[in-house]
Amino acid sequence: MSDRITTDLTDGVHTVTMDQPERDNPLRRAEYRAIHDAFRAARDGDARCVLLRGAGDAFSSGFDVEAMDPAHAAGSLPERVAAIRDNEQALAREILTHPLPTVAAVDGPAVGDAAGFALACDIPVASERARIGFSHVRLGLGLDCGLSYTLPRRVGWATAVELAATGRIVDGETAAELGLVARTVPDESFAAHVDDLVTSIAGGPPVALRSIKAALLHGADADLDAALDDEAYRQAVALDTDDHARAIAALGNDDRPEFEGH
């Protein structure tokens, strides 16, 4: 694993941190693979949600341009396609298909590929000082990191084309208005808000959390009948869990049930 990526599991929250704050957490393909492996590791074990964040005053400045050399574009066309699929797209796919709820804490710049990975998370949350932009066009490049899939789904066709074709950087407030992020939070309360959000998610019943995520992933591209059939099956499974029984037993008093994942 890259030493620029750190992980922590505390109280059900699996935190993945891009950790080179003195340079605003730039990314190379080694970091893409490390983040991919960190998300993959969270699929099993005690994690109940995954948080992607950057150390210091930035989410990430995106691909490390200083590390780019002619070898990055070397090889035949099929070899370059394979490299993109095995790195940028493998990480985007891992985040987009993750069985747990995923949160991106976008504080400061999130540019290029980093913005793509933030949008791949279920709940991107931005600080007021966030700066989000899809800057690939400024480097003579097209979209990457799943943005052709996520961007129009979040903001609609016209705004997606505008943001991608201009590389315009938007602040946190504008990002929320456009639908790029779930909400924008004042800088001074951003860390506390993110902590409250992931703590609230991680305190939920694990079977139900995975069921909700799977149903939404399935329903996003399913017709009504298929979505309802999938819901019915998953709900029937959840009804037979001890966690459901604990939740019912806790009704009528002020106790919060301690969910155990079965």
Image: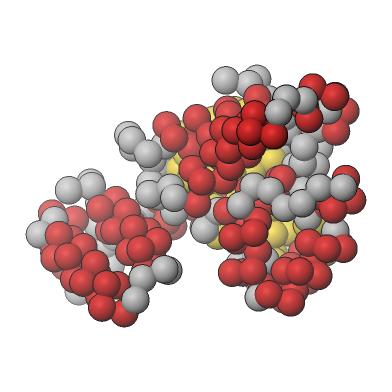
Residue 179 image point, x, y percent: 66, 72
The answer to whether residue 30 is above or below residue 241 is above
Specify whether residue 107 is in view.
no
Compare residues 248 and 67 and report the one nearer the observer: 67
Where on the picture, by quarter, is residue 241?
bottom left
Residue at (49, 43) in percent of width and height: 94
Image quadrant containing the N terminus: top right
Residue at (79, 65) in percent of width and height: 163
Residue at (58, 42) in percent of width and height: 89
The answer to whether residue 56 is above or below residue 176 is above
Where on the picture, by quarter, is residue 155?
bottom right
Judging from the image, the colouring scheme is secondary structure
Name of the residue lying farthest toward the bottom: 224
Classify residue 180 as left or right of residue 227: right
Where on the picture, by quarter, is residue 46?
top left
Specify whether residue 9 is in view.
yes
Residue 257 image point, x, y percent: 25, 57
Classify residue 172 as left or right of residue 240: right
Classify residue 120 as left or right of residue 256: right
Compare residues 116 and 137 and report the one nearer the observer: 137
Residue 119 image point, x, y percent: 62, 56
